[in-house]
Image: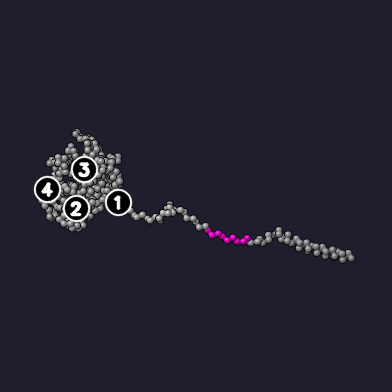
């Protein structure tokens, strides 16, 4: 009986254990792992917001803007060609010029004179353009003019003239007296690709030079540059005492890294004159009676024109000799008065003259005692003015120096 009760108790205990285990099972399962979570419903993503256009500066009532037309660049005053009515027999336009450039193989021939040089190194430098006084008479004789390859004489103001001398193949130990620039000097350094030495300029001309494409080649006390010296002389006002020399000016070009050979092709030279010339042994350019003139008398023995001013021989201070010129060119150009004041110290105000030496115009070349009618052409700013006949062929210059007399369109030259 004892055994039966024991079994019975054991069975009951076993049943309790089973039932208890079943009851504890959910609790025990919760300790070992979490029940599977109910899936969170997937939210449908909102479409990205369409960006609100940023308002333009055009008012709502404004008509949509139309792109502005491209502006046509306007040339500067110094580059605007003018239409010059040349005195031709008919209105038939002249054919375009056919230039015959100086042979580039002749590296020992100066392109501005057509003459050979003993030292080719002198042609490996940049030309120098120097502004030189020509009035009052006390400034004469000037120094160095007979060593220049090319000299321009032009009207300044008050009926007086001034000079711009271009040096390349020869050196001059003294040059001057050096004076102030004029509007024509916006063109001469450009066509010769030259350094430009001068004393100063009026406010309007100075501003134009500062804005020019050759301002880096300017040498002037106006900008604190060296290379000049004052040489006082009895009877000369202070403004007529400024001088320089070609060596000093070329050294400045060298220091600036600008002293290299330039392409100066365009002029042609011949020992023999072309056909079709007319006699011209005596020339008179009378700019202003009693104040400004240039006369040339042909010397057959020297094959050159001897230059005078107001009937007096025009000499060079360095040589003491009368200046001899192989070629004299009359260059007719439009002269336009501007609003740039050059002188207001006296009872009258004098204004700067714009001499328009771009495009083309009438020209006469004098050489070998003869005159050759033609025209000058300069289609591009960086090109030398060339002298051509009516067929457009170059008029050859005589080897040697050239003086270019710039005159108004209606100017009359005395020729005998």
Which residue is found at the position 23% from the left and 39% from the top?
349
Sequence-first disc among 1 and 2: 1
Sequence-first disc among 2 and 3: 2
Q: In the rendered view, does 5 fall on the left or right side of 116? A: right
The reply to whether callout 1 and callout 4 are in contact (CB within 8 Å) is: no
Q: Distance between the residues labelled 3 and 4?
A: 24 Å
Q: Please give the residue where the numbered disc 2 appears in the rendered image.
A: 85
Secondary structure, mark 1, is loop
Which residue is found at the position 43% from the left and 52% from the top?
59
State yes or no: residue 142 in magenta: no
The reply to whether callout 1 and callout 2 are in contact (CB within 8 Å) is: no
Q: Distance between the residues labelled 1 and 4?
A: 41 Å
Sequence-first disc among 3 and 4: 3
Sequence-first disc among 3 and 1: 1
Q: Residues within 10 Å of mark 4 (few under 14, many from 20)?
A: some
What range of the chain is rendered magenta? Answer: 40-48
Say if 351 sits above or below 268 in the image: above
Q: Please give the residue where the numbered disc 3 appears in the rendered image.
A: 156
- The spot of residue 196 in percent (x, y) is 25, 45
**Mark identifier at residue 74:** 1
Q: In the rendered view, does 123 fall on the left or right side of 37? A: left
Sequence-first disc among 4 and 2: 2
Q: How far apart are marks 4 and 2 (CA)?
A: 23 Å
Secondary structure, mark 3, is loop
The reply to whether callout 4 and callout 2 are in contact (CB within 8 Å) is: no
Numbered disc in front, either 4 or 2: 2
Q: Please give the residue where the numbered disc 4 appears in the rendered image.
A: 415
């Amino acid at each position: 009986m004892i055994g039966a009760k024991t079994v019975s108790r054991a069975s009951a205990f076993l049943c309790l254990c089973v039932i208890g285990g079943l009851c504890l099972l959910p609790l025990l399962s919760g300790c070992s792992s979490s029940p599977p979570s109910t899936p969170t419903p997937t939210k449908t993503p909102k479409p990205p917001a369409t960006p609100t256009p940023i308002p333009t500066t055009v008012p709502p009532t404004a008509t949509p803007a139309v792109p502005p037309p491209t502006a046509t660049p306007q040339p500067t005053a110094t580059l605007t060609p003018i239409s010059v009515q040349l005195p031709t027999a008919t209105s038939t336009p002249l054919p375009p010029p056919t230039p015959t450039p100086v042979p580039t193989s002749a590296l020992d021939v100066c392109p501005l004179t057509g003459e050979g040089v003993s030292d080719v190194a002198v042609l490996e430098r940049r030309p120098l353009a120097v502004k030189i006084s020509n009035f009052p008479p006390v400034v004469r004789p000037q120094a160095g003019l007979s060593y220049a390859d090319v000299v321009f004489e032009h009207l300044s103001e008050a009926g007086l003239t001034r000079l711009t001398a271009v040096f390349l193949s020869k050196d001059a130990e003294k040059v001057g007296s050096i004076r102030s620039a004029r509007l024509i000097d916006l063109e001469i350094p450009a066509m010769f690709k030259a350094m430009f030495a001068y004393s100063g300029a009026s406010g309007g001309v100075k501003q134009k030079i500062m804005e020019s494409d050759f301002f880096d080649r300017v040498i002037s006390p106006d900008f604190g540059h060296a290379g000049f010296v004052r040489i006082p002389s009895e009877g000369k006002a202070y403004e007529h005492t400024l001088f320089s020399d070609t060596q000093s000016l070329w050294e400045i070009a060298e220091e600036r890294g600008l002293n290299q050979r330039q392409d100066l092709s365009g002029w042609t030279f011949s020992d023999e004159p072309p056909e079709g010339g007319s006699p011209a042994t005596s020339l008179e350019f009378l700019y202003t009676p009693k104040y400004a003139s240039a006369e040339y008398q042909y010397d057959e023995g020297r094959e050159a024109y001897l230059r005078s001013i107001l009937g007096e021989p025009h000499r060079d201070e360095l040589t003491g000799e009368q200046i001899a010129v192989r070629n004299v060119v009359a260059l007719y150009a439009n002269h336009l008065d501007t609003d740039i004041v050059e002188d207001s110290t006296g009872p009258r105000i004098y204004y700067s003259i714009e001499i328009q030496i771009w495009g083309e115009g009438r020209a006469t070349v004098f050489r070998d005692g003869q005159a050759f009618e033609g025209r000058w052409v300069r289609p591009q700013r960086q090109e030398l003015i060339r002298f051509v006949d009516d067929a457009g062929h170059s008029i050859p210059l005589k080897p040697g120096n050239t003086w270019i007399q710039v005159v108004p369109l209606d100017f009359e030259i005395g020729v005998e």
